[in-house]
Amino acid sequence: MNSAGLFLTPATASLSTTEQVRLKAFLPDGSPADVTWSIASSQSNASMGIGSMDASGLYTPPSALASDSLMVQVTAHLQQDPARTATSMITVTPGFLQSLLPENAALAAGASLEISAQIAEVGGGSVHWDVSDSNAGALSSSTCSRGAHQYTVCKVIYTAPALLTAPQAVNVTATVNNTRTQSRVHLLLNNEGINSNALTNQSTQTGPISLGASGGNDTDYDVFKDGSGNSYIADCCGGTLGALVEDTSHNQYILSNNHVLAESDQAKIGDSIDQPGLIDHACHPLTARPVGTLRYYVPLASPQTNVDAALASVVPGAVSPDGSILQLGMQGTGSNETLGSAPPVAGSGEALTAENLGRIRVVKSGRTTGLTCSTIETINLNVKVDYYKDCAETQPYYTKTFTGQIGIGGDRFSDSGDSGSLVLDAGNAQAIGLFYAGGTDGDGHGLSVANPIGDVLSELSKQAGTKLSLVGTHAPHAIACLDYDRNIQTTPAIELPPLAQTQAINAARIASASLVNHEKGVLGVAAGKSADAPGEAAVIVYLDKNNSTRSIPATVAGVRTVVVPTDAASIANGSAPKFPVVHPGIHLSASELSAATATANRYAPQLMADPAIFGVGVTQSQDDPREAALLVLVDMDKTPRSMPAVLDGLRVRYMRLHRFHVTKSKHAGARTVSACSLRE
């Protein structure tokens, strides 16, 4: 409702507990109005409240509800005349507390899997389940547990078809209270007898534990006070106990990240390290099983350090002494048995080179997403990562710039809680790096970042005063490669605005006159769009696929070029593709990588001085995969001062992602809620 002389947008809004909405007030002439804000509701939401408004008009709903929905009235009061008001009605519905558990899984024909959804509603609520293909398995009836002092948890059992004609990807989707709020688990159905899911990594182990397991510092939780002044644990953290290392005297240590074992420099040497982590132990300290004590960590808040790593001394008998990691081994017997444990290759790991970058598949076994596989997307990455003092990420600690990092492609390779996972070559079980951070755009594109394993061992060795090496086997072995991103469309879906379409058409006319030459293998041009810079115009340059070695300029008339090998017949009948085929990995020569690295190092400080840019590395162009490119990571909530298409003759590829942070989910646009934030 708007009073005379004051207007509020949006007038109505619907959002879940993990979302926010920004309201704006305007005067009749369309200019912004200076207002103060108030909120009210005729409904009771018990002690959970009705949310909050900040001075800029951002409404944040309560973290949980005591009903299926909550109606909140937001009122704007004109500062010059408080009697002039405008209102907006906001409907809040419960969101998911976290992704479905497990987030992804591989299932053999006929195998079953229990899937659970936890929603931010107390004492009520339900979840509706669907499978993406009605012929791809069956779902049991949903069962939900509810209580006055607990969030609602709903579960369902999915069973894969008894017969599969070919491997198949299936999504099981959960919907909260028949609203638009959804979450899904991605399943890979296979005929190879492989069963794998992250519940294996999250469970409490007995006897000597295998690594790749949920774990963390026993003091890694946030304490709040209620209205009566009583303290309670409102949030807790957890990560992955990644691997086993030993010093020259054969003393063994658990390897993970600083932010997992040492709480981003906040912990104390001697702190107990638990399995599972508090995040999988209902945030109850002093009751989980201690498997180590914090011994060494590389400080984050120092420009002289370049890894996120720490070590815990092993409690005698608590850890498998051969360094076995969950799900790196062979399939167990029985239709529902998961992959077994196996050690990595012992030693100092494998370095990335031009020779192995093109063929290597990397794999990790971590607490949240289990066993996942992908390819290297970028190397020599300079990247900023935000660290916090608390699990809820409300107390900033340090923004660290790492150099020479490894970037792994795909949205499903990792998530929060996988931090500390050892990243390995799936072909031989040699260690590559230590995973510690990641980001996504929320639309299927993401990047995971790892410290090179050589740097990790070197910097930890300095802290320990002795050489450290990975514990494992001396017999290389293959690891199952579960690639949950392989079916995701990677070509840009962003439609070009009219101005960009006009730029593409005009540039194509210029390119037609200057480039097209059948004798030299340039068959034609067309207006298109860029894959290196989604949303930007491009000129498609068609090369003869039998003679596609000709160099093509990166831009024509200031517009990017997209180089596509094809044939004259395909152009004539309109079937020529609009993008080149891009093979996963980096397929470039050592000299090309060296030259691109020099350019990246030269421009990284300048580019990353822009608050909207948080990473610069070396990658392969998606507009012309024959060439190297700079990869520039752009904060998707900000706009860079400039976005050049070329720097020193090198193509520049842009990836928009949420900024990297290490505790909350990579889906950072959503305001995540701890599953531990209700008082017992």
Image (cartoon, grey):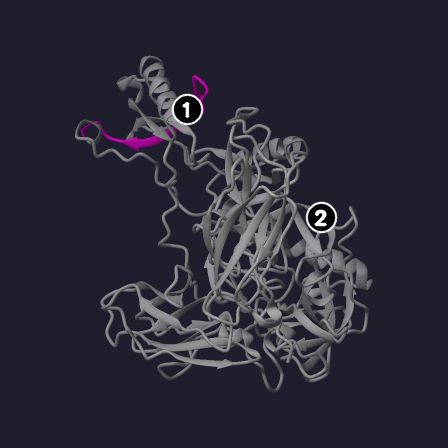
Q: Hey, what amino acid is under mark 1? A: Ser
Left or right for 601, reference 329: right
Mark 1 neighbour density, 10 Å: few (under 14) some (14–19) many (20 or more): few
Residue range in magenta is 554-569
The one of 53 and 447 positioned closer to us in this rendering: 53
Where's the C terminus, which quadrant? Answer: bottom right
For the stretch drawn in magenta, the main secondary structure is strand
Residue 291 position, x and y percent, is 69, 79
The residue sitting at the top extreme is: 513
Left or right for 537, reference 571: right
Q: Find the distance from the CA under tag 2 to the CA under tag 1.
A: 39 Å
Residue 304 position, x and y percent, is 79, 47
Residue 445 position, x and y percent, is 46, 49
- Contact flag, marks 2 and 1 (Cβ < 8 Å): no
The one of 658 and 50 positioned closer to us in this rendering: 50
Q: Helix, strand, or loop for circle 1?
A: loop
Residue wearing tag 2: 400
Quarter occupied by residue 276:
bottom right
Q: Helix, strand, or loop for circle 2?
A: strand
- Would you say residue 566 sits in the magenta stretch? yes
Compared to residue 179, the image places residue 607 above or below, namely above
Q: Hey, what amino acid is under mark 2? A: Lys
Quarter occupied by residue 252:
bottom right
Compared to residue 631, the image places residue 296 above or below, namely below
- Whether residue 126 is visible to the viewer of this picture, yes or no, is yes
Choose the circle earlier in sequence order: 2 or 1: 2
Q: Which mark is residue 551?
A: 1
